[in-house]
Image (cartoon, rainbow, N blue to C red):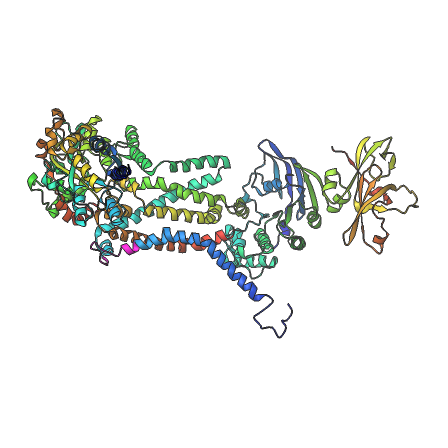
Amino acid sequence: MSAAPADLPDRGGLNADVLSADARREALALLGLCSPGIVLVGIIIVLPIGWLFWLSLFDETGMLSGANYARVVEQASYVRTFITTFEVAFIVTGLCVLLGYPLAYMLSQLPRRAASICLIFVILPFWTSVLVRTYAWLVILQRKGLLNTWLMDLGVISQPLPLAHNFTGVLIGMTHILLPFLVLPLYASMKAIDADYLRAAMNLGAPPTATFWQIFFPLSLPGLAAGVVIVFILCLGFFVTPALMGGGKVIMWAMRMEQTTSLYSNWGAGSALGVVLLAVTLGLLGVFRWLLGARATSAWGAR
Amino acid sequence: MSIARSAPPINIRGIAKRFGSVPVLSDLNLDVAPGEFLTLLGPSGSGKTTLLMILAGFVRANAGSIGIGGEEVIAKPPHKRNIGMVFQNYALFPHMNVFHNIAFPLKQRRTPAAETAERVEKALDLVQLQGLADRRVDQLSGGQRQRVALARAIVFEPRIVLMDEPLSALDKGLREHMQIELRSLHRRLGMTTVYVTHDQREAITMSDRIAVMNKGRIEQLDRPETLYARPRTRFVAGFIGESNFIPVECRNDSVWYAAKRVYTASPLPSPGRHWLVVRPERVRLAANAEPDANANLLDATVRDVVYQGDSFICYATLADGQQIALRDYCRGDVLTLLPGAGQPVRLRIEPEDAILLADEI
Amino acid sequence: MRKSRVVSALAVIGITIPVAQALAADTIAVASWGGTYQEAQAKAFFKPTADALGITIKEDTTNGLDDVRLQVTGNAVKWDITELGADECARGSKEGLFEKLDYNVIDKSGINPKLVHDDWVGISYTSVVLIYRTDVFGEKGPKTWADFWNVEKFPGRRALSGSQATETLSVAALAEGIPIDKVYPVDVDGALKSVDKIRGHIDAWWTSGAQAMQLVKDGEVDMASIWNGRAGTLKKEGAPVSFSFDQGVLTADCMVIPKGSKNKDIAMKALAMFVSPQLQANLPLYVDNGPVNEKAFETGKIPQERIKDINSAPENVKKQVLQDAEFWRDNLVEATEKFDNLIQQ
């Protein structure tokens, strides 16, 4: 770069104004290209949620009030429902991890053809309705269901195990339905782990267990985190399975929202429950990110 | 770092490996001397990487024996072989920083923390990466990653180091620089090293000995200069350096190119068709009046002359259409004296430069 | 000539306009609960009405008062008549969601006056009955709600409705020994205390008729409260069950014209047909829900031997408690919240 002639202003260069105008035009054009997406997100996400929030601020007489939120805090049954919901979500997510991680690991180690056949069996349940699958579990788990009948015929138990119409039933049913949501992202992230990392670890003296815990497991964490978040969020909004498998004794938040919406003449009553769930969910997502984020980003970054 | 004292030999006997019904290695024997830098050179699919994987213990052979310092290791799991390895893509653990990557093998060996820190420091010094211990792997350049991989492979003072095309991802300048550095590192540490590459220049630059592999067998195992000067098969001659291949025939106790007698220092082969192999830089332009003196003189027509800076290549065609290349340095005014395309020239090949090889096909 | 052309032109216009209006109003939309119940209604009410009035009745299904509220408050009314539970009708009426009914068009005679209101009218009855499995108890099962509450005398697994607080509270009041005619107005706190006594012995709180049926059918419970239609189906399927209308809780369904219906007048005529004795008498031929118009039993359409099995037959009505829609209109929210709070403990 040679020095600019003295008579030119410092900030200008050859065609500087034309080029910066061009940059501005490009930014505007990009914004224009994005606008359909922004508008769509606004219409189908931001507006309805805003409206939900707005509605939740009005009581039955149409007056601005905090009654809808007060009810959630004051009435013991709402608090209990809330606790139940998160209890179920945490346990089901935990069960999904316990069952899904070994399953995804097995799939990721199988030869490609065998893995794709097994994956079909993982995805297959998606093609039947949640209602049908839940009823199928009832057939298997209830007092005179298949499982209890077999176990009693075999003399393993003398009294039927209480597996349906209670907390256990809800856990079994939901874990089954949500398992693929954990397995699929986890499988994808496990498949992406280069076998050379594992070879390198073994070569450097790590026995198979150390290789798994120090190399494979940390590298699979981003997929696990994605799966855990999906399963957990889906749990919070689950309706059909707890309604049918819980015997009316496991009331989750979504069921409460349905009850509240039909019980109260103002939408605000149900809306407030929605807003509370949304806020807590977002808060938890933040915590998830904070817990898993650092490791996840470093592992992704290297790809 | 004191590898040299304990560097063991590697004795490979009768290794065979099939993938399904496809044989990849068959009855392979190879001895690597203590502290030697031996390169497995060959095209892709020649089995060199498979052999390396069998050495490291990642691939199970169908048959054979591997002795390291007299100890049979063929059935030992990889983590008990105590062999350092540098991978083609470095395989640095992305979730660990440089320090933890290099400390990984020490951690597996339950090395005390203070000693670990000291040895990682030394290893970083050795590969000239002082002060980068806290960097994340994805913050390193390709060359730096290469060095970290190297440091990690030697920090635990393995008896043997394996390298699987470790420089192939680097650009040319850096690659050549690293070749020299690897070589000097090997001289300083003296570990027995098996190096895999498909780059013949790299192999020649770095190796004590080169095993040229083709179709699962070792075609020739020799020092680089021997390999170059005395290739034993047409494959080796073609794979290492450039060669002219001229079809000749052996009859009546002498060798003939068409009706022309060929003088060669090679021992006389069996009657039949053979290849005469000549390196381009061993072909000379002969003055027309030069006396015969048992040298091979061939009349040809210049097709093209390609200027390459330090040298030039002259492509010529013999009377029967056989192509022949000639290379020489651009000394003095040699370029201006060169004949142009279409002009006749006479080529001269000394008998000791004319190598006779069996016709394999 | 000229004059006659004008006349004929006028005639054409005069004829065409009303015809066009009639064509536009020819179709009304009626929403009900779907399933076998709505199929029966289609055969008993909708088709005969459509044939008699020369209109088309388009069917839809509803989830209840929420749907109506959504349509009316959102100014998007798509139904001309919709079915609701009686307590929903009472609540919707208070919210002003329905059109006034014209009892000059609709003949209310034969319908219980408690189910005849300015803007809603009863259409059919469902009963909540006590069902028990005969393979567990033989014929000596629990006959009254007091029996159901007596866990020592009748050990076994039990289910009650968790979603219909009004029904379960009525049943709980009966279990306390309150006579049929004194149940309403319900002493909610007393009924809740009664629920509190039994709740530890309830194995499932059902939330849908299908679920109640499945619980009994699969032997998941030995006794339950259940809707008579579902109980009748179980019996027809040959399940080992027994039930009667003794101490049943009669719950009426009603029909309304959502406010803003575009075919109000035709809807009114159709509704008049639906509640007429002749069409009401059709209903029990197809389904176990009883007719709301007691004159239906005088039409002679219903076979004598069938009458005793119909929950709204005069003999059976006497044995049961009729749910008071207006009581629940005023007490539903508070009672339901308390009930939910109790059973979720």
Residue B71: x percent and y percent?
A: 60, 41
State which quadrant residue A50 falls in: bottom left
Task: For the C terminus of chain B, give its image quadrant.
Answer: top right
Main SS class of the magenta portion in the image: loop
Residue A58: x percent and y percent?
A: 24, 56
Say which of A104 and A248 sits in front. Answer: A248
Specify start and end residues of the magenta stretch as a single range. Answer: A52-66
Seen at 47% across and 40% down, the residue is A108
Q: Is residue B141 magenta?
A: no
Mark yes or no: residue A164 visible: no
Say which of B318 and B121 sits in front. Answer: B318
Residue most extreme to the front: C1
State which quadrant residue B348 falls in: top right
Q: Is residue A64 magenta?
A: yes
Q: Is residue C79 toward the left or the right of residue B183 in the image? A: left
Residue B182: x percent and y percent?
A: 65, 53
Residue most extreme to the bottom: A6
Answer above or below: position of B206 versus A21.
above
Say which of B208 and C4 sits in front. Answer: C4
Mark yes or no: residue A186 visible: yes
